[in-house]
Image (cartoon, coloured by chain):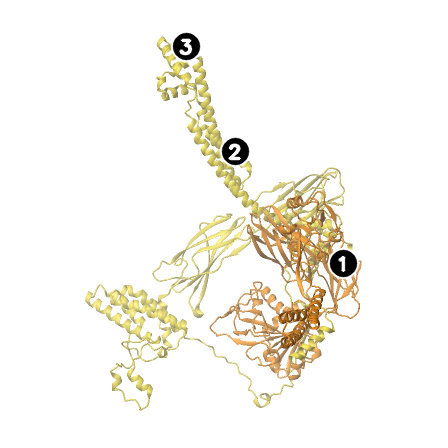
Amino acid sequence: MIENNWSIVVIALCSLLLVVLFWVEVKRSNKALLMLRLVATLLSVVSLALMVITIYVTQTTVSKKVDPVILLSHGFNEDSVSLFKKMYPISPVYFYNVDHEKNTFAGALEIDHLSQLQKVDDRQIHVFGEGLEPEDADFFSSLNIVFHPTVLYPGLQFLSWSRQVVSGERLIVQGTYQNATSSPAKLLLAGFNMSLDSTIILPNSTKTFQLSTLPKNTGKAIYSFVAFNNKDTLVSEPLPIEVTVPKPISVLILASSPDFENKFLKNWLAGHGYKVALRTTISRNKYSSEFVNLASMPLSSLHASFIGQFDVVIADAKELKQMSRGELSALQSSIDQKGAGLIVKADSSLTAGAFYNRNFGLASLQSNEANSLLIHGMDTSFRFKALKADGLLYLRSTIGNQPVFYDQQNHPLVSQAIYGSGKILLQPVSNTYQWLLSGNNTDYENFWSLILGIAAKKQPVKEHWFANDVFPTIDKPVNIQLLHSNDSMPVAQIGLDKVYLQQNALLPYKWNGMYWPRNAGWHTFIGSALQVEYWYVFNKSDYRNLRSIQKTNFTLQHTKQSSPASTGAKSNTRKVPISIAWFFFLFVLSAGFLWIEKKFL
Amino acid sequence: MDNRRSLIIIEQLRRQWIRTGVAANVLLALSSIAILFVILVKLLKLDAWWVLPLALLSAIAIFLLRTQWKLSIDDVALYINRAVPQAEESTQLLLQPKESLGFLEQLQAQKVEGIVTSLTSINPLKGDLKRALIIFLVALSFAASIFIFSTNSKNSLQTVTEATSFFSTKPEVKPAEILSSKITIIPPGYTGKPAREQDRFNMVVEEHATVFWELETSSAVNDLKLKINDKTWLPLQRVNANKTKWKVQKNIMQPGFYQVQVNNKLSELYRIEMVKDKPPVIIIKSPTSGIVIKSGQPRQFVLTSVISDDYGIKDARIFATIASGNGEAVKFKEQQIAFNNFSYGTRNSQLQQPINCRALGMQPGDELYFFVRAIDNNNQQTRSDIMIVTLEDTAQLMSMDGLVMGLDLKPEFFRSQRQIIIEAEQLLKDRDTISTQSFNTKSNDLGIDQQLLRLRYGKFLGEESNTEIGGEHHDHADHEKDATPAFGDANAVLDQFSHKHDIAEDATFFDPETKKQLKATLNEMWKSEAKLRLYKPAEALPFAYNALRLLKDLQQKSRVYVAKTSSKTTPLQPKEKRLTGELDKIAQPTFQSESKPENIGLASLRQALAVLEEMKMHTLPADKLVPLQQAGQHLVEAASANPAKYISAIEAYKRIVNGRTKTNDVKQVEKALQTLLQVPANVPSQKLMAPSSNLSQQYFNNLKKGSR
């Protein structure tokens, strides 16, 4: 009951007072009624203290038995509801978000919103079925709700996929599937009426799965996730995906000597219409320069504004060593300030302690370990064909860098580190062109696309719109979010409708809004710069299972579990403060006794 | 009382037995039909009509073999006589008319009648029926299990084909005006196939086949054309004055599709699929390439090859080239050898040809190069790989040529390998004239020589020699006689007391390949020595020869000839040109180029997929269909190369573009494009950075300040 320092101060003062008063009482020459006086003193001091400190008692109030309200949400079990209804025959029954084609119940009234429940006050609300919507949270937190969830939702338990992929990247669909049937279920990733990937879930098992494909289209498309056993289709859900065209990057290659690696890299990038500048040292301060899709310019000395044009700089260790102090600082500042990326082709001549080598540690293998190099990525998605091991170098994993590729002994082989607003990568493999020579173009493309993609300077956008719901659904409110870099007031438009936004108080670039989509399919966000972004609104029937699971979990989290014993009269315990009047009365009584004893006895 | 009743009973029995027998036969026939059906239709995938005659035949065979249905009353009576002792062999009496029986016979007949009338349930064929029933059930279950198994596997196939069956052919629709059509396909001569006729417009033809279209229209038409591959027109010629019969011919050079245009109305698309002639395939089974015929082996081998072609082989022969002599005197002689058992026009033939090197005029040391060439009816030829057969030349091994240039002029006081061979051969010749004792002694002497030679060569490999030849002979005792080592020379002291074995350092440094061969030589020498010591010089000879050949090879390997060059270089002027260290005259080259991304045409195909996806949701304005139109060109190209796969997609595409989209059209085109498109290349792409404000910038700056 002691709650703060104030109470402690009061108690301390009162104890002091008590000691003093006791002393006075004991020392008094008239010893008559000593015990009585001491008790009266104690009582008066205690009641004085308790007048200042509030104390509580727990009080159990038993309310009288009332008939609960029955609220039926989608997927309720008719039998269990009628059983419940038999116990409480006069309970009112309401439908809330019920698909009447599947579920009916005689005598139930339809409501559209929880606020329409009449005269519930303290009455219990028994919710059957999948539960309540998250947007109802404000209403039902004040209500006394008992939830009877429908237990079984076999089938799709979870599904996630990237809604936007760049052409050439793999579309990965991951999820969990519970196969409650006695025959194996086949899961299919389909697109354009062809099955693109499939997997099988054994009978009576729950498994996570991953399906993937390389989308061949660009633009918006609806792939689909299908599950079937034998002949029956169990699940068929849309997977809306936007495939964007890759945004070209510009690359500056600095080489200390001509080699195949740079030549093949330059040709490969040029083949896709990218901007490449290649500077190769011929002799001291003599360079050969090549420009693809760029105007030629002298490259004998690099300065910040020139490097600033490029998204990625690739340089070998020797060249970095040879570079003048001015060139190096120009390079450093363009990484640090402008966000460009640097890929260092490391070898043993790497300058220790240079800015580009600060977060890495280079080590060399014992030469007898292997003569071929098998590179792989973080997971199974990247497994490359063997290369001839020539350098036998690898990176030590140290604090501050994150490995991108590993060799067969799981040593980090390519690593990235953040440097200011840019990235620095260390890459000791110098014969990746052998993949191209042996026809493994895919390996070469995957390797360099990933590295260059990581290193490339990121393009800042002024606005980014997104729907904050996993499954924006027709006729349900969708939380719209905007990230906006200007200080100006953003204007939002979805299709032809205007949406009004509210600024986030803590993060001023964040704006929130609400939108009720009236039809399913692709929708547009049209921002202030008339830039269009797409999002997809699902039908009510899409991902029914996932939403049911979501709703059930949500309702369970926010309500008490139903317990049969508590369904009748409810007992409520709460803390009630004891009124000061009692202590005042006690104080007057005991103090009065002391006064009367001194005065008259 | 008459024997009518007994007759009736016997007749009943006969009928009952016949019924049973026929039932058994029917069961057997049914089981044979069931088995035939599953074997023919389900396993061999033949047409179900094949089952009918075979089933009939088997049924007839069963009925002919099992003749219970021919049972007569006499047979029944005979059986009753045999089976029922009480009948006392007199059942026949009941079959005869009463009047014809004598008194005793009548009495007997009456007696037997009582017995026979009680026989209602006797049936000798019951067991037969049971057996037939069992056979039938077994056959049925066998058939059913195969049926279920095969339909199951077919089901799984079906799901696969369902996924890909968008290209599947549907029954073709002819233009309404065409009353009848006769399409004659004359396959080219090389196929050896007769001309064939069909009334369908879709066709599968051989390369270079001639196709005649003869069309009859229901009413007179003014104009009848074929539109081929969506670009060329082929007008038909009128045959009769009524303008109802038309014809045209065309030589098919490439696959594609066509439409029939009647009075400016185009029909649907029809496929022309082309079967290309494949070149012959030659597989040479023997000999394997690079064989060496050693001396003593028969100078003959058999060439076995399998040649196959899809229509027929016109010619197959062996082209042999003999290379003789060496160095500059090498001569080539070419010869063609026909296969003895080749027959013209066969599709698949296993050919064998014995080749006699002596008959070809091959001398020892010559090499035979040969290959097989086959020409098919369409004059396409294929050559096999070139095979090499070498005749071993032992004379070459004996030649002194290799040694003339030798640098070691020291007289060798031990026999060389060649000497050992010559002496061994001489010893064999002298065998009959000398005593066994001296033969054995000489053989043993040769063995010793062989040993000495082996030890000498073993030195090169660092082997320890127990009896060293040529070098100073030192024992461990010798060490003591040697001059006392200098004081403080630790190595010398060590040498004094240590015993050194097989020191690899002592071995001459050879590359591993040479060492390997040297080891093989020593091995051969060792075997030769063993045989010589066993007084078997004849058996030692092959090993000795082998050793000699390997040694010669080793000698040849060590000689590399480098021709002298006679060119003169201009004298250098070091003072003017060299070591000045000036770089100012070095130009800095600059190259500038432009390149466009590859596969720009495919980009429109990829966009077209998105357009089609959008079409599924709502109709699109015409300006959004541009990528689709570009995709059309790709589709037409694909369809002319592979009509069976893409023709229905072309039709669907045309309906979409003309705004007469049917259900499934969009899906069909999508599917075709998806099949047509390659997987896009993975190229680096710039990522987007989420919008940030001054706040994030400040945060970043502060963070940096903090870290410094």
The front one of B181 and B316 is: B181
Q: Where does residue A434 sit, x and y in percent of width and height?
A: 56, 69
Q: Which chain is orange?
A: A
B100 up-or-down from B145: above or below: above
Taking B87 as reference, is B43 left or right? right
Amino acid type shown at disc 2:
Pro
Q: Kindly identify which residue carries mark 1.
A: A515
Q: Kindly identify which residue carries mark 3.
A: B98
Amino acid type shown at disc 1:
Tyr
State the separation of the CA atoms marked 1 and 2.
74 Å
State the separation of the CA atoms marked 3 and 1.
112 Å
Circles 3 and 1 in contact, beta carbons < 8 Å:
no
The lab-note entry on whether marks 1 and 2 share a chain reads: no
Circles 3 and 2 in contact, beta carbons < 8 Å:
no
Q: Residue at x 35, y 59 (%)?
A: B297
The front one of A1 and B418 is: A1
Disc 2 residue crowd, few under 14, some 14–19, many 20+, Cα 10 Å: few
**Quadrant where the N terminus of chain B is found in the figure:** top left
> Which quadrant holds residue B179?
top right
Res. B53 mark:
2
The front one of A350 and B566 is: A350
Disc 3 residue crowd, few under 14, some 14–19, many 20+, Cα 10 Å: some
The lab-note entry on whether marks 3 and 1 share a chain reads: no
Q: Which chain is yellow?
A: B
The chain ID associated with circle 2 is B
Taking A235 as reference, is B337 left or right? left
What is the secondary structure assignment of the residue under circle 2?
A: helix
